[in-house]
Image (cartoon, rainbow, N blue to C red):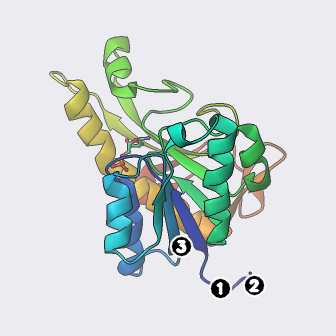
Amino acid sequence: MDGHATPRLAVLASGRGSNLQAILDAIADGRLDARVAGVFGDRPGAVALQRARDAGIPARGLRPRDFAGRREHDAALFAAVDGVEPDFVVCAGYMRLLGAEVLEPWQGRIINIHPSLLPDFKGLDTHARALEAGVAAHGASVHFVTADLDGGPVIAQARVPVLAGDDPDTLAARVLEVEHPLLVATLELLCARRIGLRDGGIELDGKPLAAPLQLASKRLEA
Ligand code: GRF
């Protein structure tokens, strides 16, 4: 694409799709110059896919059990992704691991939102584990996806306090509230091609980023 075309996004989602909705709302409001070209997932009945269809966006769920193995499922999923010719792929609550083979061609063009302050609490049940560990702050991270689970370079984070009396649900709700502006703000940078992956690290405006950007009042700061 040339530098002025509106970037096309493919979104991968497994569940309720509130992060997808945040992207769609930001585009509709003119806050994000992008277009969601397709939404894909591993659960055909996922609310996220329905949200896409409601917005007139092609959506497809491919059930893992219909494939011989993870590689075959990954390959079919990414064939569908390629079909909508995206510039970037956004994992927004896609709850399966992606193999190195399908990720390779997307290096630097595929991001994920994870509900913890990475590198803490990779994997599942992050809110319960944060409470168990007794941390004072928790949050969400957006990172470039590599084959290392939740281990790719972190672009941006948003922090929330852990409050007395929190349970995993109250903490998850507080984190989700910052996930949406965090993902949209990160996508603004990515779609404007201001942020990229270089030599395994993050570059912002052509300069190495020493630490993840931090969300403050819905904006990202160094
Ligand atoms: C979010 O907490 C996201 O960070 C995590 O899964 C959840 C998805 O929520 N990976 P939604 O489907 O976007 O509402």
- Give the mark nearest the N terminus, 3 or 1: 1
**Mark 3 Cβ and ligand 1 under 8 Å apart:** no
Q: Residue 6 at what x, y percent from top left?
A: 59, 82
Location of residue 125 in the rendering, given as x and y in whole percent from the top left corner: 38, 25
Residue drawn at the location 42% of the way across and 76% of the way down: 27
Q: Earlier in the sequence, mark 2 or mark 3?
A: 2
Rounded to the nearest whole Å, what is the CA distance between mark 2 and mark 3?
Answer: 17 Å
Label 1 Cα crowd, 10 Å radius (few <14 / some 14-19 / many 20+): few
What residue would you read off at disc 3?
37
Most foreground residue, 41 or 190: 41
Residue toward you, 56 or 164: 56
Q: Does the beta carbon of the residue at mark 1 sit less than 8 Å from ligand 1? A: no
Count of numbered circles on the image? 3
- Secondary structure under badge 3? strand
What residue is pinned by disc 2?
A: 2
Report if residue 80 is visible in the image. Answer: yes
Q: Residue at x 67, y 86 (%)?
A: 4
Residue type beneath disc 3? Ala
Residue at the disc numbered 1: 5
* Residue 182 figure quarter: bottom left
Check if mark 1's residue and mark 2's residue have beta carbons within 8 Å.
yes
**In the drawing, does residue 34 fall left or right of residue 160?**
right
